[in-house]
Image (tube, rainbow, N blue to C red):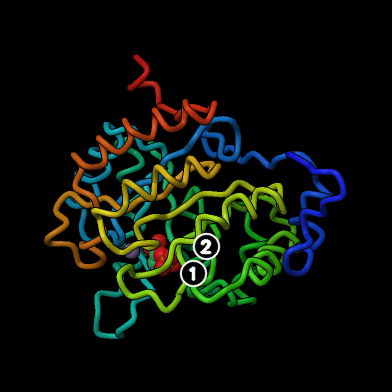
Amino acid sequence: METHKGDNPNKYGSSAPNLVNRQTNAKDTVINVNGIEIGGEEIVIIAGPCAVENMEQILETARAVYSGGANILRGGAYKPRTSPYSFQGLGEEGLRYLSQARKETGLPVVTEVMDTREMELVCKYADIIQIGSRSMHNFPLLKEAGKCRKPVLFKRGLMATIDEYLHAAEYILSEGNREIILCERGIRTFETSTRNTLDLSAVPVLKRQTHLPVIVDPSHGTGHSWLVPAMAKAAIAAGADGIMVEVHNKPLEALSDGQQSLYPEEFVQLVKDLDKISQAMGRRLFLHKSLLA
Ligand code: PEP
Ligand code: MN
């Protein structure tokens, strides 16, 4: 970490709690998921639909993101929707489809858990469990995630300060799980031209205050697919260890978040651009073997 004489990394806002704090753990935490290192030198790309909708959709999208250069497949089986009448996700059936997509492509999967009662089930299927923005303050869920043996992709709450976010992460760490990936996904401000305000300054702040990997989700961060490439590139330039983007084989037919989902061809172009930005940052993309061959 870059240090400046007389400068305290925690001086803006209150200090990061003990276990997440870089001052107590100076070394970067690197999380290994089936050989993919998150938080190391290489940039990791997580891609897939907002929700798992059916077998064909997840398989087609998984194949497309795999051949486009994704390292990890995303897709929700339990969806936190604003309206109780909107598609809520397929539950365990969706988890089974994700397993099938992992079997076909070899991509590890990340999927959200919303309820302590489903923790065991989700852990059985997922390679990484996701705790979504709306659950950031669900302390019983955080404690359960702390007890499970899977890495946690932990999203910043949409109204959370960085200090609150890091204290919430501390809940997971303090229960024994040290494998946490932080994710900036936009916060709620007065601005209405984007779905959320993507706080890219959170990236260097989090990297400075903690030893945990930091990724950015420009899909929920902006809410518009046309904005995703610019903000994904900016995230890597700001020092993020990876990005998570929504990609759908047919965005116009998506049951959730189609307007912010990239077409597979747009994703392919984005990965090419991210490769250049990564190199400019002295890093490189974690490309899987099929693309290196
Ligand atoms: C998601 O990634 O599927 C999601 C619901 O995001 P967030 O929790 O950031 O809204
Ligand atoms: Mn979504």
Q: Is mark 1 within 8 Å of ligand 1?
A: yes
Q: Is residue 187 above or below residue 291?
A: below
Residue 129 % position (x, y): 51, 57
> Is 69 drawn above or below residue 23 in the view shown?
above
Q: Name the residue under label 2.
A: 155
- Please indicate, yes or no, whether residue 97 appears anywhere in the rendered image: no
Q: Which SS class for mark 2?
A: strand
Label 2 to label 1, Cα distance in Å? 5 Å
Query: Is residue 94 visible to us here?
Result: yes
The quarter of the image that holds ligand 2 is bottom left
* Residue matched to label 1: 133
* Circle 1: residue type: Ser
Q: In the picture shown, does residue 291 fall above or below 194?
A: above
Discs 2, 1 touching: Cβ within 8 Å: yes
Callout 2 amino acid = Lys
Q: Residue 52 in the image: x percent, y percent?
A: 28, 59
Residue 139 lies in quadrant: bottom right
